[in-house]
Amino acid sequence: MLTCGLMEDPFISPKKADMIPFVYPIYHPYRQEVIGYIFTEISPLAVTVPMGRYSSENDSGLFLQIGDRLYRYEEDGNTLSLTQDAFRMRRDLSREALGTDTSVQRVLFDGKDYILISRPTGTQGWRILELLDASQLSGSVLSTFLLLTLAVLSVAALIFVLLSAFLSRTVNEPVRQLQKRMSRIAAGDFSRDPDTEWDHELGEIGRNINDLSENVLTLMNERLEDERQKRDYEYRMLQSQINPHFLYNTLNSIKWMATIQGAPGIAEMTTALSRLLKDIAKGTTNRIPLEHEVALLKDYFTIQQYRYGGSVLLRWEIDDPSLLTCRILKFTLQPIVENAIFHGIEPKGSAGTITVSIRKTAEGDVSVSVADDGIGMDPATAAALLSREDPTEKSSFFKGIGVSNVHRRLQYEFGPRYGLSVRSAPGSGTVVTVLLPFVQQ
């Protein structure tokens, strides 16, 4: 195909009109020989109308290259013309600037910097070129960049505001609530606060804080209850101490009168009772050596032997005398032996024996067992013996010191691992075991 740019239309006469001719050669079917040409033409409007729809800057130049000719598009007349600018542009631009590929490059034309945008069309030898002032284009790019930057900053600010509101609602406010909750706990308010239990991670922390505060409150209440019970036990012991010094002095006088009058049984009995009352006057919470507790038990049993006329016997089994140096709470064994006499042997209606065994366990602790051959008891009664809040033994030598109280005193003093255990069965007697840590000082 041959094209030579704009030409006057030879078929319109006498009026002149421009047209774009196209010449196609006709080849011989059997020989490589041109035997004719096909001539056709199109109106320049086929090119200028689409170019008019192209949006361009006011200071830009739009050109059409047809072969070796360069035409400037005149927007006012919607025409193509070989203007002086087109001639100079064709003369000044290098061949690389008017190459065959799409390109965007900076060029020097007419003493000024321009940006040349060149793009081939679908027709061979045809290109569209746009020439933009580089300085004005830079200003336009800068303004576009500033507008874009402003838009990005505006969007970022909006996102920041929304994110701040979201974080304030989901993080900051819950954290403030948790801080207030911790302040209330520090001030002594351990009640549960359901307002801090949200449906997210901070809500889980709020639930854990509530659980912790409830546990602390429970432990405090248990501690207060333990202290109350300990004071109650001490008060009960004080109630049982009815002026023991006065009774001790009176019994001491009775002992000397019985000795003078030749009544050794009365003297021995009053001596044992006076020693017991003397120890009562010193209190019941202090630790004493096991040897001292054994002596107190012997004094108590001396009184009971005279009461029952020797029908009750007390046997001792001590594996190692060094175990008697172990520390024990005063009056631990007396309530156990008293319980064995009054509820084990006495209901049997015949003589009985109580065996006290002192041994060392495999764990290094000290075990003191009080076994009787009395009537025994069922497992439910044996279990209730350690859990009874208010002892009901009518014959208790020291009112308020029951077996259950002894068990609690030992646990308070040495820990929950220690205390009493009961093993019994109807008709087979009862064994009460006292477990103590081997503490010598």
Image (cartoon, helix red, strand yellow):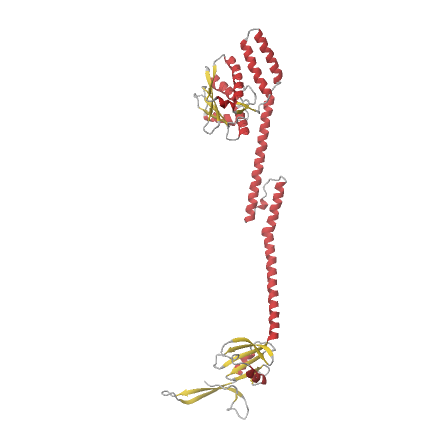
Query: Where's the C terminus, which quadrant?
Result: top right
Which residue is drawn at the image coordinates 57% and 38% (left, top)? 216
Residue 177 percent across, percent down from the top left: 61, 47
Q: In the image, 352: left or right of 14?
A: left
Q: How many callouts does the rendering have?
A: 0
Residue 40 visible in the shown view: yes
Residue 265 percent across, percent down from the top left: 53, 10
Q: In the image, 171: left or right of 430?
A: right
The residue lying toward the viewer, choosing from 48 and 30, is 30
Residue 199 visible in the shown view: no
Is 57 above or below relative to 394?
Answer: below
The residue at the far top in this view is: 261
The residue lying toward the viewer, choosing from 249 and 325, is 325
Query: Where's the N terminus, which quadrant?
Result: bottom left
Which residue is drawn at the image coordinates 60% and 65% (left, top)? 149
Is 268 above or below relative to 336?
Answer: above
Residue 89 percent across, percent down from the top left: 56, 82
Is 334 above or below relative to 167?
Answer: above
The residue at the far bottom in this view is: 14
Residue 393 percent across, percent down from the top left: 53, 21
